[in-house]
Image (tube, rainbow, N blue to C red):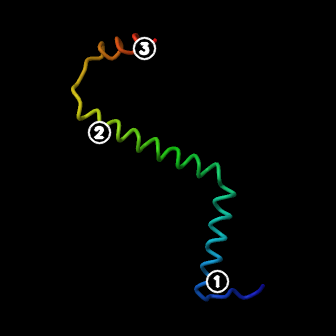
Amino acid sequence: MTPISTDHESMKKIIKESLTETLYENRELFQEIFTEIFEDIALGEAIEQGRQTKAVTREEIFKTLEQDQ
């Protein structure tokens, strides 16, 4: 086994290569993770916007949904 160089540039290169390889090999996993994150952010923003609007009844919601069909 060859010794690992510990100078800053060598370590930086090793870390970059390792991270790139990990991201490439686990692409689908990371896509799923980021999709979940973005969906959670969007849901949080929708909830916050909903808190700033007037409340409506359940009947009003279903009436609106039926009109869209």
Q: What residue type is disc 2 on?
A: Glu
Name the residue located 68 percent from the left edge and 58 percent from the top edge: 24
Q: What residue type is disc 1 on?
A: Ser
Quick one: label 2, few (<14), some, or many (20+) residues within 10 Å?
A: few
Instruction: State the separation of the CA atoms marked 1 and 2.
Output: 47 Å
Q: Which residue is mark 2?
A: 48
Question: Disc number at residue 10?
Answer: 1
Q: Quadrant of residue 51?
A: top left
Question: Disc number at residue 68?
Answer: 3
Left or right of 47, for residue 35: right
Q: Helix or strand or loop: what does disc 3 sit on?
A: loop
Depth order, front residue of 5/53: 53
Instruction: State the separation of the CA atoms marked 2 and 3.
Output: 24 Å
Name the residue located 39 percent from the left edge and 10 percent from the top edge: 67
Name the residue located 57 percent from the left edge and 46 percent from the top edge: 32
Name the residue located 61 percent from the left edge and 84 percent from the top edge: 9
